[in-house]
Amino acid sequence: MTARVKIFDTTLRDGEQSPGCSMNLEEKLRMAVQLEALGVDVIEAGFPIASDDDFAAVREVSGAVRRPIIAALARATREDIERAWQALQEAQHPRLHTFLATSDIHLHAKLKITREQCLEQIARSVALARSFTEDVEFSAEDATRTNLDFLCEVVRVAIQAGATTINIPDTVGYTIPREYAHILTTLQERVEGLENITLSVHCHNDLGLAVANSLTAIEAGARQLECTLNGIGERAGNASLEEAVMALRVRHDLLDYQTGIKTEEIYRSSQMLSNIIGIPVQPNKAIVGKNAFAHEAGIHQHGVLADKLTYEIMRPETVGVKQSALVLGKHSGRHALQKRYEEMGYAVSRSELDKAYKLFIKLADQKKEIYDEDLMAILQDGLREIPETFKLRNVEALAGTTKDAWATVTLERDGQMMSRTAQAGGPVGAAYAAIDFLTGMSGKLLDYSVHSVTNGRDAVGEVFAHVEFEGKEYTGRAASTDVVEASVRAYLHAINKAIHARHTNRPKEKAFMGAAD
């Protein structure tokens, strides 16, 4: 009989903790709605004690998303657990997820407590969480480096205190499949009552084994998989949701398990996350990368033309990748654009369509062929929910090999136009200097990347600018056939984010001891 594996998505919590992946409240809500459409069983919406922003995110997601379980993370302390429960008050299906480190290196170096004190703290915290809700998950942080005999005792105490899900995380991505399977099977053999509890795994990718370890864990008895879209997360990231889910689907002959994931929503979910956090998916990323279904070698092309199964083990449509070529032209109207978005699976409002159509017409005047990838980039620009305090009205730049570049930028704020000309080593740097003067927001550019959304000389270039303002980091994104324009819009996007964050007064300050997995 096919066993059911729950998908616990922690993109909004562990994923968002990775450098450069912060999301504001509106972005988290949009991502949570898409995760519900994707079919995940559990959404870990945040770490409420970490900041007011995290608390608000858990509270708002709890009210907006009704089908999945909404989990809130808490350290094994009364203050954390009570704060997490407050944030979950609107959830249809709330879960308290509490954790405590159990490896000797964490107990001695970080927590400075004994094993006995660790067990006492687990018992108290799980019991407290259970007094609020029947759905309590306990995670033994750094479980794979924990003494196995002690780990058995940890799990036994957590179950006796009322935990309904036990998570055995590979917190630092240290284990390998064979060892992980041994840990899980030993726990099931030696801990009474574990057979009535959901066994969960949360794997990090420090050795590139997160998905392999997760699949091995499922074969060893785990029935909940904790993962993130695009594999984002602390350090090298988490187990990639799309890779694990599609491995279970494609190799169902050997892995007789099923999930509730609607795989046709995978690509859209991946692209939405990428555009929200401003980190593009690497081209050769499994399942969702630009090259995942591309074939350049002649022998591969010949095989695919004869039969796609020669080099494709899954159909692109299975994960929501469209295979359309030319879609629309400059004479197409709003109705045609809306219909194409509907065919791509996007329901757009009138205001969103109006914004997208303006960008579409501008792009159609600049290039001959418009592809689905262009439309997706346009849509993400149109859906930008950060208020545009500063709007770009014009940018002109001149560069050469013998002189500094210069740029003149015209911005609008509250109906007032302002212009500035600046010089720098390159046109983008000159434009950024002009923007700094006009906005009074001098940013430190931490990272800047450009990649082509489509092919050809008139391809759309997508720019990601990762900028620091007043010690806080923001990512801006924009797309255009003009790289300088895209660069300016991306920088302005980051500036508008920083201004919005300042006005809403929600500082992003993570808890001192960090999060569990």
Image (cartoon, helix red, strand yellow):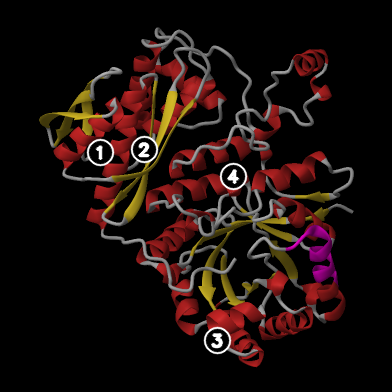
Mark 4 or mark 3, which is nearer the start of the sequence? 3
Q: Looking at the picture, does residue 149 appear above or below residue 350?
A: below
Q: Which mark is residue 388?
A: 1
Q: Which mark is residue 230?
A: 4
Q: Which mark is residue 402?
A: none
Q: CA distance from mark 2 to mark 4?
A: 21 Å
Amino acid type at mark 2: Arg
| Disc number lying in front (2 or 3) | 3
Instruction: Tally the marks.
Output: 4
| Disc number lying in front (4 or 1) | 4
| Disc number lying in front (3 or 4) | 3
Mark 3 or mark 2, which is nearer the start of the sequence? 3
Contact? badges 1 and 2 (CB < 8 Å): yes
Q: CA distance from mark 2 to mark 3?
A: 46 Å
Q: Which quadrant holds residue 224?
A: bottom right
Contact? badges 3 and 4 (CB < 8 Å): no
Q: Which quadrant holds residue 43?
A: bottom right
Query: According to the image, label 3 marks what residue?
Result: 112
Q: Residue 222 appears at what percent x and percent y? A: 77, 63
Mark 1 or mark 4, which is nearer the start of the sequence? 4
Q: CA distance from mark 4 to mark 1?
A: 28 Å
Q: Which quadrant holds residue 431?
A: top left
Q: Which mark is residue 384?
A: 2
Mark 4 or mark 2, which is nearer the start of the sequence? 4
Identify which residue is drawn at 31% across, 25% down: 485
Q: Looking at the picture, does residue 141 appear above or below residue 440?
A: below
Residue located farthest toward the front when viewing the structure as drawn: 402
Residue 95 on the magenta span: no
Amino acid type at mark 3: Lys
Query: On the picture, is 269 further left or further right than 250?
Result: left
Residues 234 and 403: in front is: 403
Q: Residue 11 appears at what percent x and percent y? A: 55, 53
